[in-house]
Image (cartoon, rainbow, N blue to C red):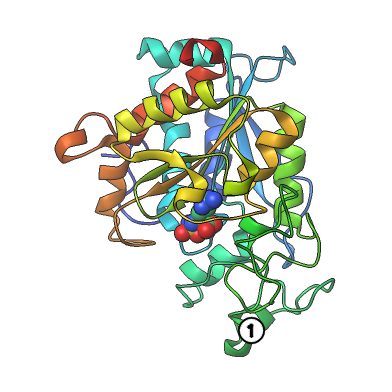
Amino acid sequence: TLPSGRTAYRQLADYTNDLASLASQYPTKVKPITLRNTSLEGRAVRGIEISRNVNVRDGKPAFVMMGLHHAREWPAGELTIEFAYDLLKNDGVVPRITNILDKARVVIVPVVNPDGFNLSRTLGYEMKRKNCRITNGQLPTPGQCAQSANQSRGVDPNRNYAGFWGGPGASTSLTSETYRGPSAFSEPETRNIQALVSGYQATTLITNHTYSNLVLREPGYASAGKTPDEAMYKALGDQMAAQNGYSSQYGYQLYDTTGTTEDWSYYATGGLGFTFEHGANSFHPAFSNVVSYYFGSGSTAGKGNREAFLIAAESTINPARHS
Ligand code: 0X9
Ligand code: ZN
């Protein structure tokens, strides 16, 4: 059973309610966060910060975990919020978790792209990937995003960051699934994460996606070359992959991209950013798969992403020990 006890995919309102109820249930350990910008359709983008005495500004290092840049990748949001439940349920029970709350801050944003997710999860266009940009520089009118003529429009939030923006592996066409947008950080979703990751000075981040069973690190674009932190970056990726059973590799080994989350975050902040691609072959398989992704199954039984996420959180406390 998942830490929250859920047995079906959440809708957007479930994420909103669950974040709010965690904040009211654990007022000294959970601080609600509203990101800087509303979405194009006017939705708040919400998260929580988790730590011991969370309302004290003590400068503990931060691990940021996000889900649902891509609307159809439903397990990405589930795994992100389940880790929050796990930390809060097992603080004081599991010593590793107690230690994480003592020494670090964990920042959880399960739904980066609420407009796209709402369309995919609730309004019937399940394969929606991008945001709800219909015309560059303009807000969509109500209902416009759901119209069939517009479903293929939108900016890919994972091509809109300012890391190598404008390079290969991203499109200039509004109807392409990898449309980069008219300029870097043109979209509220990416500006939100820019402000969040910069504000927390996140030393490690995971952006959850589906699918392909991968732990991806920089470079996302082969010509960028290895990072100066390659030894530490690889060691951390490999340790996490040893737990969830995925392949630990460079982003570009999947394919070249530019403007993805960690293409920006690593080079802008020096924090170690990873894209996790969960699952073998489906963007949102039956919900029971989420349980396996979280706790492992088969050769990874008892391990899984839970253990990988714990390692990521612990890495903020002492990154150097991973080298
Ligand atoms: O293309 C993406 O944005 C990610 N895959 S997905 O199927 N979830 O859309 C992968 C991006 C990872 N980075 C690189 N491949 N460079
Ligand atoms: Zn994705």
Pinpoint residue 95: horizontal percent, then vertical percent: 38, 10
The residue closer to the viewer here, 289 or 186, is 186
Answer with the quarter of the image where residue 140 lies: bottom right
Q: Secondary structure at mark 1?
A: helix
Q: Is residue 252 something that shows in the picture?
A: yes
Q: Amino acid at mark 1?
A: Asn
Pinpoint residue 19: horizontal percent, then vertical percent: 55, 41
- Say which residue appears at 24% left-offset and 37% top-offset: 296
Pinpoint residue 53: horizontal percent, then vertical percent: 63, 14
Pinpoint residue 3: horizontal percent, then vertical percent: 35, 35
Vertical placement of residue 255 versus 55, above or below: below
Vertical placement of residue 154 versus 16, above or below: below
Q: Which residue is identified by label 1?
A: 150
**Which residue ends up furthest to the bottom in the rendered image?**
149
Answer with the quarter of the image where residue 258 lies: bottom right
Q: Is residue 107 something that shows in the picture?
A: no
28 vs 247, left or right, is right
- Say which residue appears at 21% left-offset and 29% top-offset: 302
